[in-house]
Image (spheres, rainbow, N blue to C red):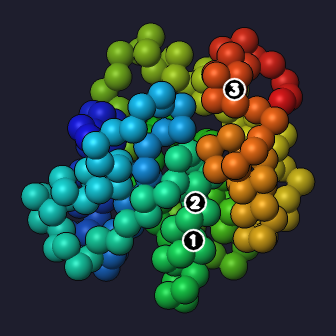
Amino acid sequence: GRLKPTSLQRVDKAVELFKEGVTEYVIFSGAWSFMYNYKPPITEARAMQEYAITHGIPYDKILLDEEARDTIGNAYFPKVRIIKPRGWRNVMVVTSEFHLKRTQYIFEKVFGPDYNLKFIAVMSALPQDVLTHIIDVEEKNLQLTQRKIGQIPAGDDKAIGEFLFTKHPAYAKYTRIKRAFLIHMLRHNHRTF
């Protein structure tokens, strides 16, 4: 249950924004990546919460989504279970700079035009060769995501949920694609499942 340095940087930014009064609540989202072949002792969201509390955010100002296992889930579950029920319309999303393009595409697709989204990119301290590789993988992931959810109308919770629970390998009980095959596809830049 330890957070990666890039995750800590994002939590630090959330803490900073909270302390500046930019936001009244902070949502931490994430179980663990469905690409992991193990289950961590605590969820990413819980680890972020614990870290944020030790850095000054009160417990009652933190909301958790512990179901998301990928970026689509990071948008969908907080939207339908936390944000929409509370009637919130303004959402600030903190992510790493290398993840911004895909995060923005996914959140705009999931939330749709009824929400005001603001994206904050946190610069990472990764070595350039590592950053270049991550950006390449992110671009492949973005292309795959666009092929899979591109035709879904922006903000259509029912259609996004149906995609997640019937087709997505992280959430669907039965799916045509399994984790190992998806990893292979991303490494070799295959176009479709």
Identity of the amino acid at label 2?
Ala
Q: Is residue 69 above or below residue 137?
A: below
Residue depicted at x 39% and y 38%: 39
Element marked by disc 3: helix
Crowding around mark 2 (Cα neighbors within 10 Å: few <14, some 14 to 19, many 20+) is many
Residue depicted at x 58% and y 55%: 73
| Residues under numbered marks 3 and 1 in contact, where contact means CB atoms less than 8 Å apart | no
Q: Is residue 133 above or below residue 25?
A: above
Q: Is residue 135 above or below residue 76?
A: above
| Residues under numbered marks 1 and 2 in contact, where contact means CB atoms less than 8 Å apart | yes
Identity of the amino acid at label 1?
Lys
Q: Where, by quadrant of the figure, is residue 144 drawn?
A: top right
Toward the front, the furthest residue is 174
If the image is split into quadrants, where does the N terminus sit? top left
List the residue tagged with mark 2.
Answer: 75
Q: Is residue 41 above or below residue 63?
A: above
14 or 144, nearer to the observer: 144
Provide residue 89's location: percent of width, then percent of height. 56, 81
**Residue 103 seen anywhere in this rendered image of the structure:** no
List the residue tagged with mark 1.
Answer: 79
List the residue tagged with mark 3.
Answer: 182
Question: Mark 2 to mark 3: distance in Å?
Answer: 21 Å
81 or 104, nearer to the observer: 81
| Pointer 2 or 3: first along the chain | 2
